[in-house]
Amino acid sequence: MKTSRPKADSSARLVRSHVHRVALAATGLALVLYLLACFVVDVVAVDRLTGEVDARLALRLAQVAPTLPRGGPTGTIGSYSPQVTGDFDDAPIVLWWVAPGATRALSLETGAPVLPVGALDVRAPTDATVAGRDFRLAGRALSDGRLIAGTTAQQVSTALSTLLVIEAILGPLALVILYGAAWVIGRSATSPVERARRRQLEFTADASHELRTPLSVIEAEVGLALHIERPAAGYREALERVAGETARLRSIVEDLLWLARLESLPASPPTEEVDVAGLAEVCASRFGPIAARRGITISVTQEGPSPAIVFAPAEWLDRLVTVLVDNACRYADDGGRVAVSVSSANGSVALVVDDSGPGIPDEDREHIFDRFHRASAVPGGAGLGLAIAEAVLRDTGAVCTVGRAPIGGARFAVSWPSHRPRDRRSIDHEAVRHL
C-alpha cells in the first residue's frame, strides 16, 4: 500500500485542481449571465420609469392645452418649485410656451428654469439639459404655438444608481457563494470517484504483492528442478509445492474475479427465498472433514417459530456463510469449536458464527473487511474472504456486528431486515458496524 500512496496523493491533488477549475468555470459563466441579466434588468427598469415620466408629461399637456387662451398665454399660470425627492408622481412639471417664430420660450410658471434654444421645437419625449440639470421634455403643437412640458429626470438616474449599487453588492456575494457551493458539490461528486481510484490503486498494489509471492515460489521451484539433479522423490516434492502454490494462486484469482463480477453488476440478480438454516447445515457438512483433521467440532442450531427465510441471491448467501464458517475453522484452536446459530423473530433473520480461537483484537476490527488484510499470521487464505463477505452484506441489506464469542473467539453476527431487499444500487445504509 505504501507504494501506491504517492500516486493516490497526486491523484487527490489533480482532483482538487480539477474541482477548482470547474468551480471557477461555473463562477465565470454565472458572472457572464449575471452581467447580462443586470443589463437587461437595468434597461427594462429605466425604460419603464422613463415611460411613466413620459405618460405624466403627456397627461399634463393634455390637461393644460385646452385651457390656454387663443393666441397663447400672456403670463404665468402657476409657480415651479424644484423637487428631486419623493415618488415619481411627486416630481413637479414645468410648462413653457413657444410662440411661432420665437427664439425664446415663455415660462408659464414662476421660478421655472429657462428652456434652452435647442429644445424649442421638441416634439416627441426627449432628454435635455435644462439649467444644468437632466430633464425629460415633451411638446405639443397647437394652432398658435407650441406647449412644452418638462420634469426632472434625476429620479430616474437615482433609481438606476441605486439599482447598480445593489447589483454591485449582491453580485460578488452571490458569486462567492456560488463558487463555494460549486466547490462543495464538486468535491462531494468526486469524492466517491477519488475513493474508488485510491482503493483501486491500493488494491492493485496489494493484489500484485499477493500474486507475486506464489509466482515467485513457483518460479524458484521450477528453476531449481531444471538446474539441479535430484532423485524422483525430490522432483515430487517440488511438484507438490508448485501444486500448492498454484492452488493458492487460483484461489486468489477466483476471489478477485468473484469480487469484480459482483461490483460490476448494474443490479442484483433475481432474488429468491433462501433458507439460511438449511444453507448453514450444508456449509457445516462441507467443512466437516476439514475441521475433523484438527479435532474441531462444528455445530448448527436453529431458533425461532418461523423458518429463517432471506430474500437474496442464493449464490451470494452461500458465499457469505462459506466465508464465515471457513474463517471460523481457520482460526479456531485445535480441538476447539465452531458454533453456528440461526434464528428468526419478528420477520428478521439472524446468523451468528462463533469460534473458540484467539478472537480479533480491537485494533484490527476496523480493518478486517479490508481486502488482503489478515488479523493474524495463521496460514491459508489471501485476505479476500471477509472482503467478499462485506460485499454480500452490503448488497443484501444485512448488518454485521463483530465482537467476542462466548466460547472465547470471534463472533460474527449477521442480521437481515424483515423487508424484502430492493435493487442493490438503491440500498442506502451502513452494511457493517464494528464494535
Image: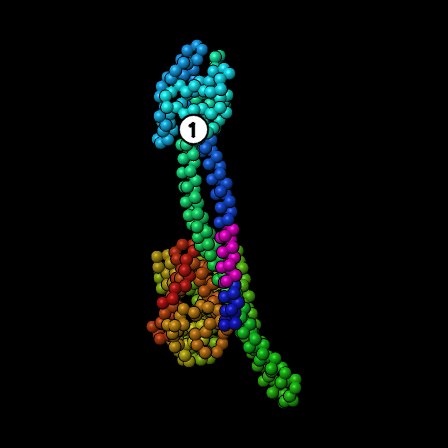
Taking the image as shown, residue 17 lies to the left or right of residue 359, namely right
**Neighbours of disc 1 within 10 Å: few (<14), some (14-19), many (20+):** few
Name which quarter of the figure residue 328 lies in.
bottom left
Residue ID at (51%, 47%): 29
* Residue type at the position of mark 1: Ala
The reply to whether residue 409 is visible in this rendering is yes
Percent x, y for residue 242?
A: 59, 80
- Judged from this view, the residue extending furthest toward the top is 70
Percent x, y for residue 299?
A: 40, 72
13 part of magenta stretch: yes
Which region of the structure is painted magenta?
12-26
Q: Which residue is mark 1?
A: 131
**Relative to 186, residue 384 above or below:** below
Residue ID at (56%, 75%): 212
**Relative to 333, residue 110 above or below:** above
Task: Depth check: give the residue in front, 413 or 92.
Answer: 92
Residue ID at (63%, 85%): 225
**Relative to 112, residue 67 above or below:** above
